[in-house]
Image (cartoon, rainbow, N blue to C red):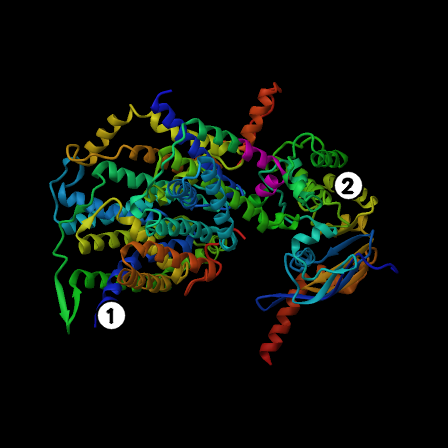
Amino acid sequence: MLLLQQIINSVMLGSVYVTVAVAFTLTIGILNFLNFTIPTLFMLTGMTGWAIAYWGLPMGLSGPLPWPVALVIGILVAVLASLVVERFTFRYLKTRYGDSTEHAIPLVSSLGFLLVLENLVQIGYGNDSQRFPGPDADLTLNIGGLFVRIPQLVSLLVTVAIVVGLTLLLKRSRIGRGLRAIAENPDAANILGVDTARVVPVVFMLTGLLCGLAGALFAVNYGEVSPFMGEDIGTKAIAGMVIGGLGSIWGAVLGGLVVGLLEMMTVHFFGADTVQVVVWGALLLTLIAYPQGLFGHNSIGKGKL
Amino acid sequence: MSAAPLLSLNNVSKSFGGLQVISDVSFEVPAGVRMALIGPNGAGKTTIFNLISGVYIPDTGTVTFDGTDITSMPSRRRVGRGLARSFQNIRLMPHLSVVENIMLGQQSRASGLIDMTLPLGAGSRWRRDAEELLAHMGLGTFPGEVAATLPYGIRKKIEVVRALAASPKLLMLDEPAAGLNPAETANLRDFLKTISDTGTTILIVEHDMGLVRSLCDHAVVLNFGKKIYDGSTRHVQENPLVLEAYLGSRHAKDHDAEVHREATDA
Amino acid sequence: MSGYMSGILSILAINIIFAYGIFLAVATGQLNLGGAGFQAVGAYAAAYLTATFGLSVPLTLLFGVVLAGLVGVAIAFPILRTKGVYLVLATFAFAEVITGAILNSEELGGAMGISVPAYVDWYVPVIMAVCVIGFVFYVMSTRFGLAMRAIHDDEQVSDLMGVSIRGVKVVAFGIGAALAGLSGGLYAVSYSYVEVQSFNALLSIYVLLYVLLGGTQTAWGPLVGATFFTILPEVLRDALPALKTAVVGLFGDADNVAPPDESWRFVILGLMTILMMVIRPEGLVTRTMVENLQFWKKGATSARREVTEG
């Protein structure tokens, strides 16, 4: 029974990771781009959501707003920020020689955005943890002796909806076909009439949306936000993505859940301090021994050659 | 051709993902000759180069060079055996200067610990060597320039010189005249003849038949990954199979379509 | 010399050595995002050996260098099989595993850190930095350095030219790890204290950015990059408070927020990264620039045009 409860808890925990892992895997799978702004966008939603719910809009435009409104604005901020990132990591960049560090330019640029956004948030809002004025996170359902917290259940359902929706979008829609064509071969996609300049921003909008939703769910679930909330989630999401296989959405789902389980078990058996070693160790081992992960393709993320 | 050939391919085949790119190709390159490997686009010429230089390993068949079976020898060892090549699209190191690119070409002769750890400054033997080679080949004016900034024709020649810097026995050139104007091509031909006169064997992939005829005395023709001709360049254009392969690329397509239609009708 | 100046000189020298450690990997085309891990190995080796066995400073530094170098080579063999994004992630994960392991080791002080019963003055790191600069310039002038740059440009062609890709990559990565270890050891004995929290992921990011923004085509790049970003915050020290209040007033509550002083430095670093990647992704110092300066120094005619390179 205790074990079952642990598994339920880890699924709930994993579902937060899944959303962010899907954002990572989407950009890597389609654009071959490891986007380090993803954890920052997650944090941005949480912190701006908190600031608007606590202080109101900047420059005295309004007083404190109700938390759902604040979170919606927070998600919009993440989407907008993601679109700004698109400008500077893809639109304005051109590769010239195709040497081995050149393919990493967007990655380096995203590191720049990570620094700017994270530190601006700290300058604006301070670097303390803040209590998010959401609903009571401890509302609990008791199903035959097993406890499920309602906000967690909502998160899980939202995550499932996101993943299913995203899969349908990629499989069925015109945009989805364009995205998959770019993932296969960007040059060929261009020749086949896929308008890269219009399709690539969609990836970034989806990234912003996924991170924003995940950040909002996190704020509601844990009732606490901080400028550093993205770092831990980013770690776990990257691990989930790698274990699942780069570029595979269902891989990211499974990987996120595996990481959640791994974390629960590690805490249970070895204590909280060892989580970092175990999760990153699993990631390192996967990269070295089985880089394609559970569902990935060998070709993704290699860069040139 | 009584002497043992410098290079021989014996029944080499290669396929990629079920697509047969090279099927059962055999030919020999005798020492000291200037030989051409020709054929329509997609015939598999560059693949043959990649099989010889070790970028790919053949599925079946063997490659023998200078008396040694090199079929599965790692690609980086082959240049040390005397096998150097250039590339279809120029692949000079863009951030290295001209003379540094040439010094990179010397790598196979200088890979010992001492050569790796001595500086390649102004007085070093290897730099002098490289500069002399460049001057000898009429390229002495740009040693310090970064390769990426030079005009196309010059870079094409530098790539040939880089391959030469390995002091190869066999120099393999992949379309060295592509993109050159007639004057530059004539210049290149004389350049290659000079190299050949020093005893270096040349195997060249080229579309410019004028250059092929004036430079080479022997040609191997490929079509759809198969060898269709192996003989003198003088008679190559009289061969019906070669004529069909080249002139009839349109005819061939129609022919294919017809076969296809018949097959589906049946 | 004032304590303020000598403190800046120490950290500057340490950052320069650290940057060269990462540069050797990046110049070979391998983005090493695990710098903090290697620095931590050197720092903890020095700290632990001094604190526990009372070894002298030169000896502990040497141990730190050798250990970090060995760890670098040992990890390079499996890690360098990976490429692109995988390599970035693998080096990053490596650093996290190292710091995580230190955090869990009671022997190494865990979250408490170790205080180091040794202290060196500013001139020790500075002298070491000068030696490292000389060493890296020498390496880049050899055929080995040529092979490194060739691999960076085109791995396949380098292989066909006879360069041992694996060998050059592993050696460059290993020497780089050893230099990062040296910077860590110097850090430990300069500050007389190490704690694992200072070797975090952001540190790995900063040092990689110093190198990339400085430029990876010549050995001048990391020197310029590390110096610029170490000195910059000191220069801006007076201008920043005003800026800070302005931004806080715009977005937040100026009365209740006390932003960390370091933040501005990183905002500037981040902004410069974003802009540089758009305008000049090859970094501040390029080969052509260095060559033009040399020609200029030799008094060659000014007719030599500034070649617009990539």
Q: Amino acid at mark 1?
A: Leu
In which quadrant is the N terminus of chain B drawn?
A: bottom right
Whether residue C135 appears in magenta in the rendering, the answer is yes
Q: Residue at x 13, y 43 (%)?
A: A54
**Residue B111 vertical position relative to residue C82 in the rendered view, above or below:** above
Q: Amino acid at mark 2?
A: Phe
Q: Residues within 10 Å of mark 2 (few under 14, many from 20)?
A: some
Front position among marks 1 and 2: 1
Quarter occupied by residue A266: bottom left
User: Foreground: B251 or C52?
Assistant: C52
SS class of the residue under badge 1?
helix
Q: Which residues are magenta?
A: C134-149
In which quadrant is the C terminus of chain B drawn?
A: bottom right
Q: Is residue A98 visible?
A: no
- Check residue B191 in the rendering and tell me which mark sits there, or answer none: 2
Q: Provide the chain ID for the residue under circle 2.
A: B
Whether residue B237 appears in magenta in the rendering, the answer is no
Q: Position of residue A121 (x, y in %)?
A: 25, 40
Is residue A197 toward the left or the right of residue A206 in the image? right
**Residue C231 vertical position relative to residue B230 in the rendered view, above or below:** above
